Amino acid sequence: MLGATVTLQGCLLDSLFDGPEIDLARNPYIYQRSEYEAPRRTNAPVYVTRLKDRRELPDLDKGPNYRQIFSDEIWARSIPVMVEEILIEEIDHSKIYNGISSGNGGTPKSTDIILEPTLLYMYRMREVMTEAGMTGRRRTVAVSSLQIRIRGPVDVSGGRPTLMDEVFYQHVATQPRLGRPEEGIALTGRTLEQIMKRALAKIYESNSVVRSEPAAVPASTGKTGEPNADPAKRNK
């Protein structure tokens, strides 16, 4: 499992959502596209299957702190639909593959690479600290995990070799503080941003087929992965 933990400095992240809808894929203050572009294209197209929703929730009775899961009802659309849309857009924009199709229409060809995503975790929770020196402080935590399996084009045996099977995990939390913590809607976006950055690089590395041509070089937009939206707004 490829994972990481990030702590945010008590930002009032939820103040960003007075205007745009609360949608992972459509609100740039919740999720920022990675801007990853592959050094060279793979000489095969990719077929992305429908995202499998295998989400699990943590055992809230484990651990020293009191924990409460936030409802998913706040989102404009279902979480699997939003994550699938982001994944397809990221892969298409990355120019890793020479064409892309998905399970939303059509069927894979024998020459396609098959990418199979599975959502394992995506939840937010409020945590009330009980450790010495931290008793009564609260923080908001977001956890996401995405599994990506990639199979190559059909080979001479009639099968598809597995090129990659990885699980990407990200944990993001605000600093503990007294009083009611924010719902941390944007924390979910931060987890998915970090997962996508690592996943796209790993997807590119995993391809064993010959890479045929350099990907297009985009106009300079700053460092890879930095947000396009006003950072002052994201860090209030």
Image (cartoon, rainbow, N blue to C red):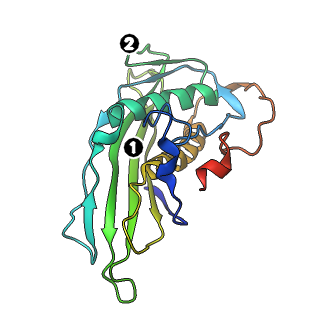
The image quadrant that residue 125 belongs to is bottom left
Q: Is residue 19 left or right of residue 136?
A: right
Residue toward you, 41 or 64:
64
Question: For the view shown, which residue lies furthest in the right direction?
Answer: 220
Judge whether residue 96 can be spotted in this image: no
The quarter in which the C terminus is drawn is: bottom right
Q: How many numbered discs?
A: 2
> Which dot marks residue 147?
1
Q: Residue at x 41, y 27 (%)?
A: 160
Q: Which residue is mark 2?
A: 107
Give x and y (percent) for residue 190.
Answer: 51, 50
* Amino acid type, callout 2: Thr
Do labels 2 and 1 touch, CB within 8 Å?
no
Give x and y (percent) for residue 100.
Answer: 53, 19
Q: Secondary structure at mark 1?
A: strand
> Which dot marks residue 129?
none
The quarter in which the N terminus is drawn is: bottom left
* Amino acid type, callout 1: Gln
Question: For the view shown, which residue lies furthest in the left direction?
Answer: 61
Per the model, the C-alpha gap separating discs 2 and 1 is 21 Å
Q: Residues within 10 Å of mark 2 (few under 14, many from 20)?
A: few
Q: Is residue 220 left or right of residue 211?
A: right
Q: In this rendering, is residue 143 above or below 134?
A: above
Q: Residues within 10 Å of mark 1 (few under 14, many from 20)?
A: many
Question: For the view shown, which residue lies furthest in the bottom direction?
Answer: 132
Q: In this rendering, is residue 22 above or below 190?
A: above
Q: Residue at x 34, y 84 (%)?
A: 131
